Structures are given as C-alpha cells and as structure tokens.
C-alpha cells in the first residue's frame, strides 16, 4: 500500500501545480516548485517572479489567467525516497477576445524527493509540443519556451 500512497502523493503535486497556476497564485507555484528547479530557474521567489513576468492575469476575473491546465496520463515511478513522473498537459483558455480553445499542449517531466515533510518537486521540465493562440496568455514570445 505504501507504494500506491507514494504514487498518489506525487500525482497530487502534479494537480496542485495546475490548481495554483489557474488561480493566478504564482507565489504558490514558486513555493511548490521552489525546493528544486523549474526549467533551470531555482528558488521560490525567482520561480514565482518568472511566472508573474510571463503570464497574463485578468484582474476582472479574480486576477487569474483564465486558463485550465489539464494534467493527463500521469505515469509515476517511485524508488525509495525519489520518484519521477511524466505526464501530458493541455492548457485551455477563454477570454473576452479569445474563444474557448486549447492554447498549449505538451509534456511534463518531473523529479521528486521525499523527506520528513513529504514529497516535493526537485525538477520540472516542460516540453511544449503544440502552441495555439497564446496572445491572451503569455507576455513573451512563445517560441522562447520551445
């Protein structure tokens, strides 16, 4: 049962990321990923600042990005106090100017460790495979994330 519990705990971290980013809680994203690195950026404050500087939020909609990050098909491998996961993601968005549509599709490659406080991210790598209309989502050139 402990291996199943470990897999579920790691999977919950994948879903927690989606919940935080869709809520526009970039400080929370930084805290979640901050014990490791996100695409080469380390530290909670730096990761949170990265999201805040690249992702548009809509004050009239709770200061959220008006997105839903769907994390699909997670495959989690646990080995003692470390784990890896790979999953597919699809980000959908709808704004006043953009119809409901998928805007980014790709894969997450994650690594985790466990200590006395539980499981945590040690690394997140994002492979963007498809980019749609991200004009209401990103405040940067989307080709920089490929």
Image: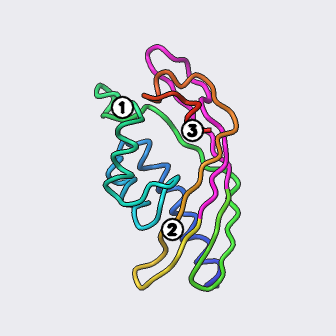
Secondary structure of residue under mark 1: loop
Residue 47 belongs to the span the image colors magenta: no
The picture places residue 55, in percent across and down from the top left corner, at 42, 35
Quadrant in the picture for the C terminus: top right
| Pair 2/3: label in front | 3
Quadrant in the picture for the N terminus: bottom right
Along the polypeptide, which appears first: circle 2 or circle 3?
2
The picture places residue 90, in percent across and down from the top left corner, at 63, 40
Q: Which residue is mark 2?
A: 122
| Pair 1/3: label in front | 3
Checking the image for residue 57, the label placed there is: 1
Question: Residue at position x 35%, y 58% from top?
Answer: 44
Checking the image for residue 145, the label placed there is: 3
Question: Residue at position x 68%, y 33% from top?
Answer: 130
Residue 102 belongs to the span the image colors magenta: yes
How many C-alpha atoms fall within 10 Å of the one at disc 2: few (<14), some, or many (≥20)? many
The picture places residue 53, in percent across and down from the top left corner, at 36, 37
Above or below 119: residue 39: above
Residue contact between numbered discs 1 and 3, judged by CB atoms under 8 Å: no
Along the polypeptide, which appears first: circle 2 or circle 1?
1
């Amino acid at each position: 049962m402990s291996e199943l519990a470990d897999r579920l705990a790691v999977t919950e971290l994948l879903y927690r990321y989606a919940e935080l980013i869709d809520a526009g809680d970039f400080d929370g994203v930084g805290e979640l990923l901050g014990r490791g690195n996100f695409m080469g950026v380390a530290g909670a404050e730096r990761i949170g600042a990265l999201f805040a500087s690249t992702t548009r939020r809509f004050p009239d909609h709770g200061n959220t990005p008006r997105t839903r990050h769907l994390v699909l098909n997670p495959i989690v491998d646990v080995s003692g106090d470390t784990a890896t996961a790979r999953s597919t993601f699809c980000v959908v968005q709808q704004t006043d100017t953009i119809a409901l549509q998928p805007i980014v599709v790709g894969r997450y490659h994650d690594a985790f460790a466990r200590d006395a406080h539980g499981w945590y991210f040690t690394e997140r790598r994002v492979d963007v495979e498809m980019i749609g209309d991200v004009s209401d989502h990103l405040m940067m050139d989307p080709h920089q994330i490929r």
